[in-house]
Image (tube, grey):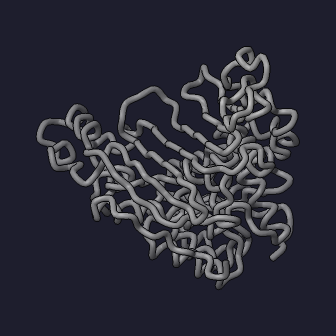
Amino acid sequence: MPHRSPLRLAIAGGHRGAAFASALDSLENEIDLVAICDTSQQVRARWVETNPAIRVFDSFERLIDDPNIDAVFIATPMTLHAQQAVQALHAGKHVLSEVIAAVTLEECWQLVEAVERTGRAYMLAENYCYKRETMFVRNMAEQGAFGEITFAEGAYIHDCRDLNIHTDGSLTWRGNMRSGSTQSSRGNGYPTHSLGPVAQWLGINRTDRLLRTTTFVTRSATRQEWAQSVLPEGHPNGMPDAWANSADSASTLIQTEQGRVISLRFDSASPRPHNMVHFGLQGTSGAFVSRRHDEEEPLIWLEGVSPGVSPANFNYAGMARPEGHESMGHPQWQVLWELAEQYEHPLWARHGEAALRSGHGGGDYFVLKDFAQAVTTGERPPIDVYDAVTWSCITPLSIQSVRQNGAPIDVPRFNRNS
């Protein structure tokens, strides 16, 4: 339903939520940050120091009871996202949720039912969908530049070992998940940074859907060695079996209804230089590969546009090849940005300068802007609850697949009206 503007927003999870301060400053005419909630007195004090007028809460329940709050941005630990989103929706609040949306299939269904029952807006804050590069490729895919897309891949590879253990040696919420203290983490525990952009390129939940998935994992070698190296001898979190339910790397394959294949990799343990994301796309008339490190550029090849000619263009049914074809050269990659005049996404063309002042390569700005617009206008959020649970359910499905030795698992159809 349409709402007033600016949107009166509260952040649950003030520590993580602070990363969005610059984006919120850029959107002050559309979003009014009125409150934050955090269990840490230190975090609450920091917010008051920089924003004396802000209301602070130490209880999520008291936050969502405040009638002067229109919407809640949930930036708490991942295991709380679904539960708190459902609570907020039933309290009459619109919800923007950090990733992933839910960690179990039951939570996925609870989220869907809460949105359908309350009619409130729910959006997943998947900022990787809004990076300039991923929106650029999305615009190309929607214009048919790649022909028919047959394959896409995404990887999130980020050495997060230091985020698993507190300075006193106890496990953080991430450590609890990765060690299997709360549930087995032998699966793809963080799929949406990779799957979100790919799903938009392929029109998932619009013109195609995820059909089935399988996952294989490596053993937990790196995380185990690291824990032993930083903890005192004999510490329980450094013992040989402490990380037995974890895995260094998970590889997930997904088949879509239209016969495409998506390949995902998640690795938050392996040591390597800091370049968290990798993407690739293959179509019948073009391909895309993202950069591997900061000194590289994303690359594109489009048949009939990029330099060089594919041998497949020549007719082998007895017809002569074109005169001088030898000088045409083999297909050559070109830098993605060279096609900006034709394929820059309209949102980046209009708001790119403002977006780059926010975090995650501009993604935070667009997430907040699109959420506020959806609430204000009553439009469908660009990443709605069905997208959120479809992308997030890969976590519990991958764990199930690993337990069944890589058996393919069907992906639920969460939107029963589609």
Looking at this rendering, what residue extends furthest in the bottom direction? 117
The quadrant in which the N terminus is found is: bottom right
Q: Relative to 317, is 106 on the left or the right?
A: left
Question: Looking at the rendering, which quadrant does residue 304 occupy?
Answer: top right
Q: Is residue 314 above or below residue 183?
A: above
Front residue (pair 359, 137): 137
Residue shown at the point (66%, 46%) measured from the top left: 20
What quarter of the picture does the C terminus occupy? bottom right
- The image position of residue 329, as x and y in percent, is 70, 18
Q: Is residue 128 left or right of residue 412?
A: right
| Residue 22 at x, y percent in the picture | 71, 41
Q: Residue at x 67, y 55 (%)?
A: 200
Residue 103 visible in the current orientation:
yes
Task: Determine the residue positioned at 28% across, 64% down.
Answer: 404
| Residue 362 appears in the figure | no
* Nearer-the-camera pick, 274 or 358: 274
Residue drawn at the location 80% of the way across and 44% of the way down: 26
**Residue 201 location (% of width, % of height):** 68, 51
Q: Position of residue 390 (x, y in %)?
A: 56, 66
Given residues 68 and 173, the one toward you in this image is 173
The tally of labels here is 0
Residue pushed farthest left? 234
364 w.r.t. 411: above or below: above
Answer with left or right where residue 2 lies relative to residue 295: right
Q: Residue furthest front?
A: 318
